[in-house]
């Protein structure tokens, strides 16, 4: 079963919306330089399914901020899959913010998905969940994002094989921030590639 078919199984009646998003990424996303042209054949697995793999870690009805959302990843695939979520797409760059605004309107998500232009460290709102992918190492994420979710929420970051080293480098900061880290192996579909999710939560 190919990744688009896997997505069809998990998105069900929302498949046409996520399919439209993939179309936008493969056209305007590439034209505007937000997605590399070599990604065109890997949009379903590397972007949609990889993002959707975080869904089970997000509580029902959560207010989420996707920090450094870029072209909307992982925020938009999560928003389409989970109509219960309210998601802010935080992105400092003008062009990317414009892309997010147009894309959210195109997909009809504007009631509960909010593009916001800015940097994480300048944002004064708080959320139940912070998501991020490919934005910064754990030390920087802690500095920028802890105020966005502390003391009641959690940060969920898609991370590659560097996560153990990043956690070791950030160990003192983690301790002084009174946060604990857990790493989960997750996937959106039983046949999808496994991906790593780092969860940072306040110590109880
Ligand atoms: C490599 S891109 C990743 C985009 C997207 N998350 C993805 O996985 O495709 C990193 C993004 O983080 C944004 N960014 C960089 N520093 C940031 C900060 N301090 N606060 C919020 N976003 C930031 C950049 O503008 C860029 O869009």
Image (cartoon, helix red, strand yellow):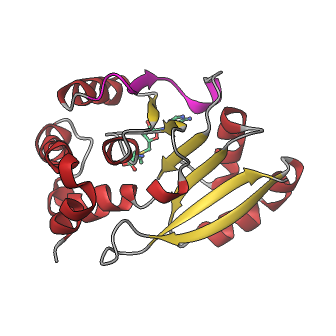
Residue 188 shown left or right of residue 20 in the figure? right
Residue 174 shown left or right of residue 67 in the figure? right
Residue 170 appears at what percent x and percent y? 76, 58
The residue that appears at 25% across and 54% down in the rendered structure is 11
Q: Which residues are magenta?
A: 109-122
The residue that appears at 74% across and 38% down in the rendered structure is 150
Q: Is residue 33 visible?
A: yes
Quarter of the image that includes the N terminus: bottom left
Of all residues, the one furthest to the right in this rendering is: 176
For the image shown, how many numbered marks are present on the structure? 0
Write down the quadrant of residue 50 in the picture: bottom left
Image: 41 above or below 201: below
Residue 112 shown left or right of residue 140 in the figure? left
Residue 140 appears at what percent x and percent y? 66, 46
Image: 54 above or below 121: below
Residue 18 appears at what percent x and percent y? 21, 47
Closer-to-camera residue (117/14): 14
Was residue 114 drawn as part of the magenta stretch in this picture?
yes
Write down the quadrant of residue 157 in the picture: bottom right
The residue that appears at 22% across and 57% down in the rendered structure is 43
Residue 159 appears at what percent x and percent y? 52, 62
The residue that appears at 27% across and 41% down in the rendered structure is 34
Residue 19 shown left or right of residue 174 in the figure? left
Q: Is residue 42 visible?
A: no
């Amino acid at each position: 079963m190919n990744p688009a078919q896997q997505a069809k199984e998990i998105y069900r009646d929302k498949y046409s919306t996520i399919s439209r998003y993939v179309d936008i990424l493969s056209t305007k996303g590439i034209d505007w330089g937000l997605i590399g042209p070599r990604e065109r054949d890997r949009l379903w697995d590397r972007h949609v399914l990889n993002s959707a793999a975080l869904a089970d870690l997000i509580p029902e009805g959560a207010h989420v901020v996707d920090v450094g959302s870029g072209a909307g990843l992982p925020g938009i695939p999560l928003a389409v899959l989970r109509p219960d979520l309210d998601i802010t797409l935080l992105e400092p760059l003008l062009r990317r913010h414009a892309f997010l605004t147009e894309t959210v309107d195109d997909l009809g998500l504007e009631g509960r998905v909010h593009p916001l232009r800015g940097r994480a460290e300048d944002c004064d709102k708080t959320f139940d969940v912070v998501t991020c992918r490919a934005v910064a190492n754990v030390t920087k994420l802690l500095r920028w994002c802890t105020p966005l979710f502390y003391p009641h929420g959690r940060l969920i970051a898609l991370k590659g094989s560097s996560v153990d080293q990043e956690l070791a480098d950030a160990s003192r900061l983690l301790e002084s921030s009174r946060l604990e880290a857990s790493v989960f192996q997750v996937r959106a579909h039983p046949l999808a590639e496994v991906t790593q999710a780092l969860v940072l939560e306040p110590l109880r």
